[in-house]
Amino acid sequence: MVDTATSTTDFRLLIGDSWESGADGTYDVINPATEGIVGSAPEGSADQAREAARAAAEAFPGWSQTPPEERAALLQAAGDRIREKAGDLLPLVIAETGCTATVGRTMQVPVTASRFDRYARGALEPSVIPLAPQEVPATALAPGGLMGALARRAPVGVVACITSYNFPLVNMAGKIGPALAMGNTVVVRPAGQDPLAVIELVRILRDVGFPPGVVNVVTGSSPVTGEALVESPDVDMVSFTGSTGVGRRIGEVAGRTFKRQLLELGGKGAALVLADADVATAIGMIGSVWAFHSGQICTAPTRAIVHRSIYDQVVGGLANMASALKVGDPLDSDTIVGPLITGAHRDRVEGYITSGRDEGAEIVVGGGRPDHLDTGFYLEPTLIAGARAGMKVVQEEIFGPVIVAIPFDDDDEGVALANGTEFGLYDYVFSKDSARAMKISRRMRAGNIGINTVQRNHETPFGGTKSSGVGRDGGSFGLHAYTDLQSVVWPG
């Protein structure tokens, strides 16, 4: 693996055709594993965010009329160039996020490229929906006749793409790709903790030939630039991935000007393990919380809701798994659990663990900082058992390497526990009887359900219910999310 040395790149904002320094200087991006400085990110201002939105608005008329074949060619060129630049992007994204080499090598950079590939094809998907003609009698408005009609998907306009820190490249590609494919222009606003690889992604898009103003990027360590984009009259849509709290604020501000919103927010994934489940499968899938970016993922099955007849078996298996996972340097090939993104976030997660203990739950394994690591924002894989429905650790998103185990006695109680939080992003059912699992899944209030797996199908509509968000993306549904439906009617 390439060493994640401090970057000497001069990172800048892209506004229209101009690479600019941050109006408010720079700030340091910190490596969560070493606590060293990865590089200096531009501290953009509210005025620069508004300028970027204006540049995108000015570029929109021309880009929206660009032939789909041209948009597809540029998106494919971006995917190809990302693969060429993988050797530079990979160490940067590992250094910024603290993800393990395995996660970076398999899920951060390659998936980013594949998303551009997917939406290069998506740009060529039909955007017109033919409708049957309708016989209409004469009215006071117009003569009667056989009226032809169609519905077509038109670009929304300028999209503010605002993403979370856990998968900075992948999440941004999932917004930029479909938005550009459908003829929108974008202003990219990456998470403040790790914006550098996203700036490099935007540089790639500029280099492969996207016209000035079509893709812009502004960054900052505070919410200033993001808030300016959400408020800007030049922004027509906000696409956001992040916390429910920030999503609520975006909804309040964007609602004033009736902006389109696509919000993928927090999760508190329920893994409902029925009495007839394959225990080994359930343990392996639920344990992925620890192995997959230290639990910093909104779809993680962080609540193990287990039938009482196998509860001790599942808890014991999870405890054994947690004890066997190596916590350490993300660059080591055998590291499974890397650091959390910041010291402040680790403190937050530790606060949840303390609250679980104080409310009477049992910390079965973990709960502290690894003794062998003096530097970095590390936390042990943690299992909390004996939890009850009303506990804070059961109700709130922790976003760290923490699993909470809760027993249940019958299907009704299990489903009630699964549905018993404000979240509804991704839940899971484990049973050897697939028909039974399918029946149970229809009672679960979540946008996505996994049956005996935590694997994804990226063509499915992805998004949440309740406080987990509004709207759906993924596959062709992602294309639809960045369009307005227009109706066209004419006399036959």
Image (tube, rainbow, N blue to C red):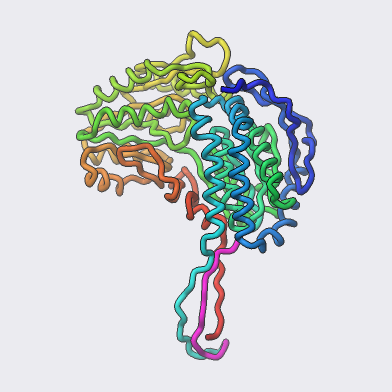
Segment colored magenta = 141-155
Q: Which residue is located at x 23 percent, y 34 percent?
A: 277
Q: Which residue is located at x 65 percent, y 18 percent?
A: 36
Q: Which one is in front, 433 or 412?
A: 433
* Position above or below: 138 against 48: below
The answer to whether residue 131 is visible is yes
Q: Which residue is located at x 60 percent, y 17 percent?
A: 34
Examine the image and state in which quarter residue 388 appears. top left
- Please state the horizontal and vertical placement of residue 365, each as a whole percent of the image: 37, 16
Examine the image and state in which quarter residue 72 appears. bottom right
- Please state the horizontal and vertical placement of residue 407, each as a whole percent of the image: 27, 29
Examine the image and state in which quarter residue 362 appears. top left
Please identify the dominant SS of the magenta region: strand
- Please state the horizontal and vertical placement of residue 439, each as a whole percent of the image: 25, 48
Q: Is residue 404 found left or right of 278 in the rendered image?
A: right
- Please state the horizontal and vertical placement of residue 413, each as a whole percent of the image: 26, 38
Q: Is residue 107 found left or right of 259 in the rendered image?
A: left
Q: Which one is in front, 283 or 103?
A: 103
The answer to whether residue 156 is visible is no
* Position above or below: 75 against 140: above
Which quadrant does the N terminus fall into?
top right
* Position above or below: 64 against 262: below
Total residue callouts: 0
Q: Is residue 142 magenta?
A: yes
Q: Is residue 402 found left or right of 436 in the rendered image?
A: right
Q: Is residue 276 magenta?
A: no
